C-alpha cells in the first residue's frame, strides 16, 4: 500500500510515468494501471491518501474474479476422484495427472495441476493436514459432552459417556454410548467398532486415557496391559497420541465436533429409557451421517470406505476377545492359590509353593503365570472356598493319597477280612483325612495279623 501511495503522490506532482516507474521500482504498466484507477474513481490524491490501508486495498489492490473457464472446470471435476485415489497404496499425483492429461490433452501441466489441487483441497477441507493410507489407522476417543437416558421406573436421568471412532482414510465413523470410560466399557466399544467396520486396521490411535495408557510419555507411553492384550488378540498395534499434542488425533477431534450436530441434535429431541434404546437411536443417526455426501465431493464416507478401505483391513479373528482381569497372590503350602474376588482356590505345580504368581481371569477361564510363563489353566468356578485341583500339579506322595477313595478302601478291606471291612466303614464315618484313615486301617490290619499269627 505504501508503494501505491508513493506512485500516486508522484503522479499528483505531474512527473512522467517512466520516471515514476523507475523511482517506485515498478513496471510502467503497473503505474498506468494505478493511474487509470485513480482517474476512474474521480478522486484526487489527498482524498485517496486519507484512506486507510484496507480501503486503499479495496480500491486498488483487488482484481475482479472471473468465473473458471471450461478447461479449469474439467480439472476441478477430477479433483474429488484424485483425492480419493491418493489414499490407495501405490497411487501418487504423477500417475493421476498422467491419467487426467490423457483424458484432457489440452489440460494443465503437472506443476499447475498440483498447484490448483492444493488450493482445492485447502478450500474443501481446510482442517486436513495429513494424508491417511487406507486400512492404516483407527482413531478412538470419548466425546466431552455426555448423553443420557431416563429410567422408566424411577425417572432418574442417567448420564452416559459417548465413544467415537473414525477411520483415517475413508472417515467412516462409529459412535456408541457406554456407561463409563473404564477399560471394560472402552475395550468393549473398541471391539464393537472392529465388528462394525468388518475388519482390523494396522493400528489403533487412542488418547492418553487411563483405560488405554497406564503412564503417558512423549516418547514411550506405558500401555494398559488389558488393552494391549486386546490388541494382540486382534493382531493390531496401539499408537497412543502424544500428550498435549491434539494434532495427533485431529481427525477424531473433528469427528466429535461433527457428531454434536449430526447425532446429538436429533438424539436430544427424543427421550430414551435404556442404554440399548439410546444406542439404537444413535446408530440410526450415524447411518445417515455416514451415507451423507462429503462437502465438495460426490461420494459419502460409506461409499469411500467400501471402495478404498474395506479390502485393506485385516480379517477379524474367529473367536471374540474375552476380557481379562488380573490378580496377584501367593501360593499357599497346599499348592493352591486363592483368586480373591471369588474366594476360590486353584492348584499350581507344587514347585511354586511360596512364590507370588499372577492370575489372569475371564468369565470362563483362569490362567496362572509366574515370570511370564503360564503354569496352570483352569475353568473358572465361583463357589467360595472351593478347590480346583489338577493331579499333575501334586507331589507323587500326595497324588498317591488322593487315589485312595472310599470305594478303594472297601475293595481292599473286603479282600482281607470282614471285621477289617467293618472297621474301615467306621473310620470312614468319622470323615477323617484320607491319609489318616489309611494309616488307621494299616494299623488295625497289622494288629489283626499279629492276633492271627499269635493265636
Image (tube, rainbow, N blue to C red):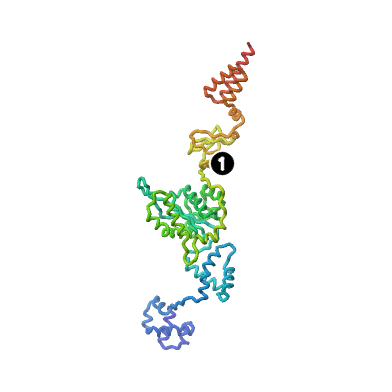
Seen in the picture, residue 294 relative to 316 is either above or below; the reply is: below
Residue 108 rendering spot, x and y as whole percentages: 55, 75
Residue at image coords 57%, 36%: 348
Q: Is residue 22 visible?
A: no
Q: Secondary structure at mark 1?
A: strand
Residue 138 seen in the current view: yes
Percent x, y of residue 439: 58, 22
Disc 1 crowd rating (10 Å Cα; few below 14, some 14-19, many 20+) is some
Q: Residue at x 38, y 81 (%)?
A: 48
Location of residue 397 with respect to 252 vertically, above or below: above
* Quarter-of-image position of residue 101: bottom right
**Residue drawn where x is 45% and y is 88% of the image:** 16
Quadrant containing the C terminus is: top right
The quadrant of the rendering that contains the N terminus is: bottom left
Name the residue that disc number 1 marks: 369
Q: Residue furthest right?
A: 453
Residue nearest the observer in this picture, 27 or 373: 373
Residue farthest toward the top in the current orientation of the protein = 455
Please give the count of numbered marks on the rendered protein: 1
- Relative to 194, is 392 on the left or the right? right
Q: Nearer the viewer, residue 77 or 58?
A: 77
Residue 162 locus on image (x, y percent): 44, 53
Amino acid at each position: 500500500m505504501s508503494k501505491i501511495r508513493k506512485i500516486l503522490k508522484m503522479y499528483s506532482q505531474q512527473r512522467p510515468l517512466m520516471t515514476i516507474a523507475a523511482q517506485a521500482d515498478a513496471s510502467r504498466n503497473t503505474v498506468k494501471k494505478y493511474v487509470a484507477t485513480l482517474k476512474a474513481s474521480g478522486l484526487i490524491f489527498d482524498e485517496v491518501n486519507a484512506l486507510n490501508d484496507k480501503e486503499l486495498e479495496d480500491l486498488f489492490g483487488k482484481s475482479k474474479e472471473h468465473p473458471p473457464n471450461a478447461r479449469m472446470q474439467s480439472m476441478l471435476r477430477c479433483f474429488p476422484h484424485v483425492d480419493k485415489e491418493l489414499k490407495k497404496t501405490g497411487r501418487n499425483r504423477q500417475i493421476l495427472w498422467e491419467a487426467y492429461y490423457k483424458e484432457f490433452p489440452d489440460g494443465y501441466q503437472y506443476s499447475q495441476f498440483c498447484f490448483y489441487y492444493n488450493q482445492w483441497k485447502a478450500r474443501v477441507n481446510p482442517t486436513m493436514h495429513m494424508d491417511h493410507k487406507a486400512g492404516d489407522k483407527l482413531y478412538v476417543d470419548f466425546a466431552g459432552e455426555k448423553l443420557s437416558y431416563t429410567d422408566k421406573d424411577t425417572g432418574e436421568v442417567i448420564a452416559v459417556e459417548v465413544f467415537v471412532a473414525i477411520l483415517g482414510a475413508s472417515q467412516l465413523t462409529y459412535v456408541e454410548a457406554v456407561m463409563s470410560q473404564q477399560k471394560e466399557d472402552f475395550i468393549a466399544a473398541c471391539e464393537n467398532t472392529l465388528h462394525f467396520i468388518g475388519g482390523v486396521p494396522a493400528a489403533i490411535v487412542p488418547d492418553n486415557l487411563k483405560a488405554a495408557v497406564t503412564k503417558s510419555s512423549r516418547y514411550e507411553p506405558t500401555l494398559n496391559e488389558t488393552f494391549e492384550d486386546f490388541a494382540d488378540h486382534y493382531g493390531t498395534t496401539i499408537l497412543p497420541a502424544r500428550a498435549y499434542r491434539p494434532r495427533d488425533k485431529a481427525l477424531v477431534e473433528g469427528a466429535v465436533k461433527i457428531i454434536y450436530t449430526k447425532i446429538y441434535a436429533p438424539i436430544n429431541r427424543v427421550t430414551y429409557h435404556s442404554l440399548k434404546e439410546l444406542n439404537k437411536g444413535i446408530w440410526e443417526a450415524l447411518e445417515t451421517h455416514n451415507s451423507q455426501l462429503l462437502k465438495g465431493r460426490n461420494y459419502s464416507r460409506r461409499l469411500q470406505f467400501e471402495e478404498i478401505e474395506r479390502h485393506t483391513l485385516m480379517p477379524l479373528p474367529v473367536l471374540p476377545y474375552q476380557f481379562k482381569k488380573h490378580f496377584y497372590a501367593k501360593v499357599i503350602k497346599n499348592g493352591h492359590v486363592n483368586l480373591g474376588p471369588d474366594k476360590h482356590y486353584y492348584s499350581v505345580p507344587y514347585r511354586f509353593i511360596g512364590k507370588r504368581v499372577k492370575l489372569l481371569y475371564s468369565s470362563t477361564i483362569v490362567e496362572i503365570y509366574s515370570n511370564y510363563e503360564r503354569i496352570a489353566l483352569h475353568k473358572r468356578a465361583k463357589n467360595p472356598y472351593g478347590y480346583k485341583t489338577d493331579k499333575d500339579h501334586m507331589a507323587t506322595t500326595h497324588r498317591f493319597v488322593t487315589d485312595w477313595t472310599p470305594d478303594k478302601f472297601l475293595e481292599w478291606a473286603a479282600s482281607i477280612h470282614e471285621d477289617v471291612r467293618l472297621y474301615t466303614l467306621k473310620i470312614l464315618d468319622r470323615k477323617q483325612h484320607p491319609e489318616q484313615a489309611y494309616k488307621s486301617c494299616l494299623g488295625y490290619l497289622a494288629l489283626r495279623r499279629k492276633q492271627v499269627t499269635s493265636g
